[in-house]
Structure formats: structure tokens, C-alpha cells
Amino acid sequence: MFDPTSPTFLSNPYETYSQCRKDSPRVFYQPWDAWFLFTYKDCSVSLKEKRLGRAPVFDENDSVSPSAYLPVPEHHQPIYEFSRHFMLLSDPPTHTRLRSCVKKSLTPAAVESFSSVLNGIVDDLIAGVVCKPSFDFVSDFAIPFPVRVTEWMLGLPEHDREQVREWALDAIGMFEFLPTMKTLDKAAVAFTSYSEYLQKMLEQRNTGVGGDTLRIIDLLLDIEGEKEGLLSRVEVIAMLTLLTMAGHETTVNMFTNSMRALLLHPQELEKLLQRPALLENIGEETLRYDCPVQFIGRQALCDFDLELPSGTLSLKKGQQVLLAIGSANRDEEVFEESELFKIDRLDASKHLAFGMGIHYCIGAPLARLEARLAYEKLVAFLPYLELVSEPAEAIDPGRGFLFRGYQRISVKWKDSFNRPSS
Ligand code: HEM
């Protein structure tokens, strides 16, 4: 019986996924009035379906419908007020307008120009761990790397780093399916505080305080205005908030999951050392094998029959459909030996870890660049690292099942590593 809240499922969802793909590729989960889909084909067809949307669905009283994605009690108004300007939670035409404002700043060519800054961060983080006899890869690398990348892109001062990470973590809780009141309370506070903080940052930037490097924050300010096609001030703040949140936990998880997979599969690491051209594939195969975001949510925008490869699904307006992309990425109909981590898998990049269709992850080129640059340098150190214990906690117990990453990966240097003294 599929239960997305059971601790066994949360600690290792892959066995359940495999069984579901075989026996019941679509499951109606009564407590949430939601459909879960598990196969690659069903997920990809749904991601391209225009009648499945992302914005909260309203009923005739302008309230969010009971089964909609985002519940909005009065004191959580800041979340609602704010997130309605997120491209991730909007449908066309609003989505198209918001996305087109920022997409040029995040193309593969645009982010390639961040390389020297990113390389500097990687060098700095590696220098910090080589002088320690043992370290936690999560807190010493996986978390600070994306945090510092965001800090640079948004031109935020270094001394606010910890606070910004805390806000990002709290705010991202709203993306959980049916988040708890406590999660939403924290998210509401984080949204209010972070938007006030960004408001101040933008004011300082307008008056020329804050440096002259052209970063995303400046590009957004360039397209701020009241005319059609431009972003309002609240939309600029919402965009910066979304980029902070969306690029954070996801990228941290990509790093924790890739490091764990490499350390637990020494034969794959060996292949990598023999064939450095496989470096590009570390990110792709990790995103497929142990996906940082396990589910994508959609809602029916009207009553309709969704024709899926597994059969027809009759949906009511506002009903949720949860696409198990973590399962789709292990679908044996698409990926040979799908349960194995294989660094030389040729078609790994067919994964759905970045989604598909109009909401396809706009930060994918940046995440891929971060993975490539980090592993170009980390790979030389990997043969000298060993796990101190099995990585702890694939999930944060206080959270739901949306994200999958490890909270601690304790590693130590082997005796053969010539460690510089600190
Ligand atoms: C490995 C890292 C990442 C993963 C696994 C990931 C995953 C995803 C997924 C699955 C979606 C689609 C959600 C949907 O269809 O509802 C998405 C969208 C999005 N991602 Fe990422 N993401 C990553 C990194 C980033 C980064 C670094 C940024 C920011 C620079 C970012 C910004 C966004 C935004 C703004 C959207 C919404 C796009 C839209 O609605 O059109 N992501 N991401």
C-alpha cells in the first residue's frame, strides 16, 4: 500500500517506486485527494499537458480550492501575496512574461561567464577541507557552494550569508505538499523578512551603493518598470527570492547525493579516474539515480480526461497530480539497469530531474556548471577520501517528501593522502 508519509518510504523510496511501476503505475491517494504517477511516460506526458497548471486554483469565492496546492489561511498571507509573483507558481500568460524577463541571464553561455567566480569559490572550499583530518562534506562543501554562488549573483554581503541560508531553508518549506502549519508559519516569517531585506538591498543598489559588477540583481533592475514586458518592484523581489530558494536546497542535494553515490561505488569512481571525459556525467547520472527533487506537483485547471500511456485519468478542477520524477528516472523501460549507478551511462541526461515543458528548470545550466567545475577539482581528491559512516538521514525528519538529500556525509582522508598541515 503506497503511503508517501511512511518513514520507510521516506528513507528509501526506490523500492516502493519499483513496485508501483510494476503493479500500480498510478495510485489515488485518498487522504490528499491526489493522483500519484510513477512511470517516465506518464510523468512526461503530464508535464507537457496544458490543462495541468501550477498556480493555485480558485473557486467561485476566490478562495483556494480545498485540494489546491497552496492553502492560504489569513496569517500566511505574506506567502500567498508573494508567491503569486513566482514564475514557478504561475501559468501562462503570467508565467511566460516572468520567465522571458530572466531567461537570457541564465542560458548556458551566460552562466559560463560566472566560471572564474565559481572556480574561486571551489578552490576556497577545497582549501578549507584539505587541512582538516576529517570533515562533513555537507556543511563544508555542499551547502556553502550554492549559498556563495547565490550570494554573488545577487550581490549580497558576505556577513548576511547565514541569515540568508536560514530564510531560504524556511521559505522553501512552502513548496512541500500540504505543508504543516509550523512549516508555513516559518515560511511566512522568512518571506516577510527576506523581502524586506531585498527591498533595502535594491534601494542601496539604485543609489549606486553595492558595487558595479553586472549580476542578476542588476539585470533585473534594468528590466524593472511600469511598462508592459517589464517587471514591477514586487516582481523583482519575488524573482530574487525564487532564485535564492529554487537554487539552494536542490543544488545542495545534487552535491550530497553525488558524493554519496561516488563514495559508495568505488568501481564507478575508478572508471571516472580512467576516463576524465566522464566528468560531465557525474551530475547527470546523480540527478537520474538519486534525484534531489522527487516530485513535481500539478493541478487540473478544469474537469477533463487526461489520456496517459497507462490509461485515462478523469480529473476534477483543482485536483492534484503528483509526478514521481524520482521514480520516472529509475524506469526500466527507459533506462537499462535503471537501479544501478553507472557513471558511463550514455543516456543519463534524459532524466526528468529538471522537469520538462514550460517550467523546465531555468537554473539547470547553472546547476550543471556548478557540478562540472566542482568535480573537475574534487575528482583528484576522491581516491583519498573514505566514508566514516553511512551518510545520515536522507530526509529532514521535519520536512515532507519533496526533496531528497543527506544531512551529513562524514569523510576522512586516507593515510595515503599527503595532507597539508593547518
Ligand atoms: C540540481 C539542482 C536543481 C534541480 C534538481 C532543480 C529542479 C527543478 C525542477 C524539477 C523544476 C521544475 C518544477 C516544475 O515543473 O514544477 C525547477 C524549476 C525551476 N528552477 Fe530549478 N533545480 C535546480 C537548480 C536551480 C538553480 C541553481 C536555480 C536558480 C538559479 C533554479 C531555479 C529554478 C526556477 C526559477 C524554476 C521555475 C521555472 C519555471 O517555472 O519556469 N533551479 N527546478
Image: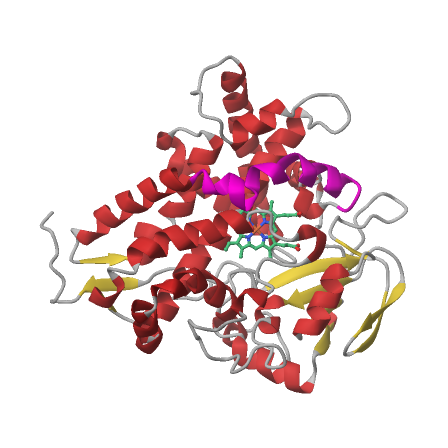
Q: How is the image coloured?
A: secondary structure
Q: Is residue 111 magenta-colored?
A: yes
Q: Which percent across, then down, holds residue 186?
A: 54, 44
The residue located at (78%, 26%) in the rendering is 228
Quarter location, residue 206:
top right
The residue located at (56%, 35%) in the rendering is 240
- Answer yes or no: is residue 260 visible: yes
| Residue 408 or residue 351, whichever sits in front | 351
Q: Is residue 269 above or below residue 15?
A: above
* Main SS class of the magenta portion in the image: helix
Number of marks drawn: 0
Quarter location, residue 319:
bottom right
Q: Is residue 280 left or right of residue 387?
A: right
Tell me which segment is drawn in magenta.
Answer: 91-114
Q: Which percent across, then down, holds residue 300?
A: 81, 59
Q: Is residue 287 above or below residue 197?
A: below
Q: Residue furthest bottom?
A: 23
Q: Is residue 283 left or right of residue 103?
A: left
- Answer yes or no: is residue 351 visible: no
| Residue 317 or residue 223, whichever sits in front | 223
Q: Which percent across, then down, holds residue 378?
A: 30, 57
Q: Residue furthest left?
A: 421
Q: Is residue 225 left or right of residue 326?
A: right
Quarter location, residue 271:
bottom left
| Residue 194 or residue 344, whichever sits in front | 344
The residue located at (35%, 57%) in the rendering is 375
| Residue 233 or residue 163, whichever sits in front | 233
Quadrant in which the N terminus appears: bottom right
Q: Which percent across, then down, holds residue 366?
A: 50, 47
The residue located at (65%, 57%) in the rendering is 178
Q: Is residue 415 magenta-colored?
A: no
